[in-house]
Image (tube, helix red, strand yellow):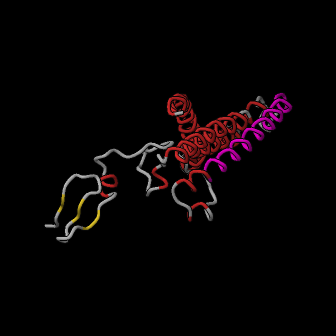
Amino acid sequence: MGSLIALLKAIDRGIAGVEMAVGVGATAGMLVLVLIPFALRAVGTWYEPAARLPGELFWMAPVSRFLLFWATFAGASLATRSRRHIAIDVVTKSLSGRARATAGVVAALVAAAFCAITAVVGAFVVRENWDQPEVLRGFYKGPVQLVIPIALAIMSFRFLITALEDLRGAITGAYLRAYEGAAEPGAHHGERPSEGAPEARGRGRRPNAEGGEESGRGTGTERPS
């Protein structure tokens, strides 16, 4: 199972690179298109020709909305990769160990199925709207909406990775960092902290008879200065 998860995560890293480029590019383009009209109006207060330009650049507003649409779905998919998506953990946060990992498997499989079904529906909608004109001449609804099934399919794929990781945790006891404490920044899909990290060094210590701390990993006794 470990080799399968490693393969899927390697594929996921490649997908994430493309998503990051799309998200950053769409966000940057959206900001530029939104700010240009404001800048032209400001310049137009003392240079009259500039004040007339925003009316001629009417296409910027709808294009910026299209870019926001793509950036939003790219960001939602990336949040799923790092397990930062919206989750209701009223029940699972009270669990620990294998119970939480098992619950994670069920939740991830349900989420993967939901995203997969929604992606299929989204693909059908995109096909139906492919030639439907948008408000802006020259744009069509289908290409603009194409990000919906793509992002949902990727999210389904990532939920499957999450389910496999939690299943491995439920079977072997190799639980994710999320089950043991705060996640290390930048950790994705079950990556564990390095042994030198403060969280890793501090885990498992217990007080000794002399008032210091003894490491549960056999690294010796530490006494406060």
Residue at 43% across, 58% down: 181
The x, y position of residue 122, in whole percent, is 78, 37
Q: Quadrant of the N terminus?
A: top right
The x, y position of residue 164, in whole percent, is 58, 40
Residue at 50% across, 29% down: 3
Between 209 and 22, the residue placed more toward the observer is: 209
How many numbered marks are there? 0
Q: Is residue 225 above or below residue 128?
A: below
Give the magenta-colored segment's residue range. Answer: 103-132
Query: Would residue 53 be visible to someone looking at this image?
Result: no
Q: Quadrant of the C terminus?
A: bottom left
Residue at 51% across, 56% down: 97
Between 78 and 61, the residue placed more toward the observer is: 78
- Left or right: 137 with respect to 175? right
The x, y position of residue 206, in whole percent, is 29, 64
Between 144 and 109, the residue placed more toward the observer is: 109
- Left or right: 90 with respect to 186? right
Q: Is residue 217 above or below residue 143?
A: below
Residue that extends furthest to the left in the rendered view of this protein:
225
Q: Is residue 178 above or below residue 58?
A: below
Query: Would residue 165 be visible to someone looking at this image?
Result: yes
Residue 120 among magenta residues:
yes
Between 23 and 154, the residue placed more toward the observer is: 154
Which secondary structure dominates the residues rendered in magenta? helix
Residue 141 among magenta residues:
no
The x, y position of residue 134, in whole percent, is 80, 36
Q: Is residue 90 above or below residue 81?
A: below
Residue at 53% across, 36% down: 20
